[in-house]
Amino acid sequence: MKESLLNSFRNDVKNSGADSFPMFVDSFTNIWDYEFGSLDDLPHDVDELVADRAIEYGLME
């Protein structure tokens, strides 16, 4: 389950634009939190991807 969710997120983000990126991040983080209880155990590459892209789109400083 984890690997499938991670792979889907990675593909979605890779193909996302400024408009769709927040939707993919919200969806992924909601599902991950629901399934696994927190975002604390995100793989490092996904954690960095979310943070880097969020900064890039002005969603986070």
Image (cartoon, rainbow, N blue to C red):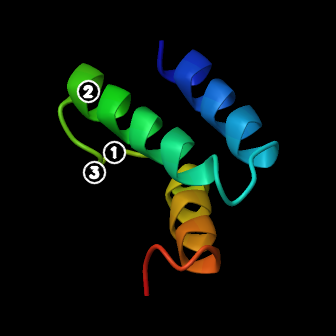
Name, please, the residue furthest toward the front.
19
| 50 to the left or right of 10 | left
Residue 49 figure quarter? bottom right
CB under 8 Å between callouts 1 and 2? yes
Of helix, strand and loop, which one carries label 2? helix
Examine the rendered structure and indicate whether residue 6 appears above or below residue 22: above
Where is residue 2 shown, x and y percent of the image?
48, 21
Where is residue 22 shown, x and y percent of the image?
51, 52
Amino acid residing under circle 3: Asp
Residue in the image at 69% along x and 45% along y? 13
Where is residue 1 shown, x and y percent of the image?
48, 12
Q: Return the mark for residue 50.
A: none
Between the C-alphas of marks 1 and 2, the distance is: 8 Å
Nearer the observer, 5 or 53: 53
Q: Which residue is mark 3?
A: 40
Of helix, strand and loop, which one carries label 1? loop
Nearer the observer, 60 or 4: 60
